[in-house]
Image (cartoon, rainbow, N blue to C red):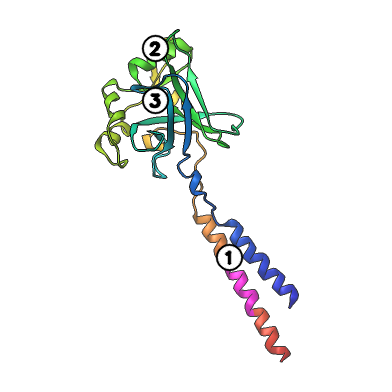
Amino acid sequence: MKNVQILVFVCLGMLGAMLPQAKASESNQKTIFKFSGPVEIPGQVLSPGTYVFKLADSMTDRDVVQVYDKREDHLYGTFLTVPDYHLKPAGKSVLTFEERAAGAPEAVRAWFYPGDNYGHEFVYPKVKAVALAKANKQPVASMPDELTTNTTKPAQTMQEPHVVAMKHAKLMAQQPTEEEVEIAEVFLLPPEHGEPSGLPQTGSMLPMVGLLGLLSLGTAGLLRYAGARMEERR
């Protein structure tokens, strides 16, 4: 009977270990940054101060970043990003910046959350992306210039027309040579944009459900067997 109990507990332990674990504090990757000088984000320049960066409140919008003031009372903008890969995950939140001319504010290039290989590279309006690509000698993701004002409009949900327009916009990549190429040739684009993506996709839950089902059946069988053995001994 003791052996049966051990097997049952092992099965139940496996069930618990395989259930997806989530941390509310990490769901939107909320990060607080303090800037000692002006910093440029797509469509505007932030004054020195403290700001909150976080993903849109939807598991389907992992390529949409929002920037708020310190108290999250004011939304400065809603921005499209494309995946940026780092071989070694950072131990803390990191912002990378584009090189700019002397006296010009630094422009945010990408944001990396602790422990993640894939960061969020900001998509700039085309004119700005062209200038950044030439200055930094590396490709910059771009969107149509006419969508620049869409980034600064209020966005209570990701279904706002101006946000939807950005998410469905034709994104491109500006090369240092001033050549414009398909973004999929340079960046790993998320599937929301309908382009090929090299990102590892989250696996379907069906195999997990099936395995959990088998473990449950096995546990139930062991319990029935244990009950039958106990009846025989009475």
The answer to whether residue 218 is magenta is yes
At horizontal 65% and vertical 83% (from top left) the residue drawn is 227
Q: Which residues are magenta?
A: 215-224
Q: Nearer the viewer, residue 7 or 135?
A: 135
SS at circle 1:
helix
Circle 3 packing at 10 Å, graded few (<14), some (14-19), many (20+), is many
Q: Position of residue 145 (x, y in %)?
A: 29, 20
Quick one: label 2 or label 3, which is nearer the N terminus? 3
In the image, taking residue 14 as reference, residue 150 lies left or right, namely left
User: Mark 2 highlights which residue?
Assistant: 131
Which amino acid, mark 2? Ala
Which amino acid, mark 3? Val
Q: Nearer the viewer, residue 40 or 14?
A: 40
Query: Disc 1 or disc 2, which is closer to the eye?
Result: 2
Q: Is residue 38 above or below residue 120?
A: above
User: How far apart are the two marked residues, 3 and 1, measured between alpha carbons?
Assistant: 46 Å
Circle 1 packing at 10 Å, graded few (<14), some (14-19), many (20+), is few
Q: Which mark is residue 123?
A: 3
In the image, taking residue 167 as reference, residue 52 lies left or right, namely right
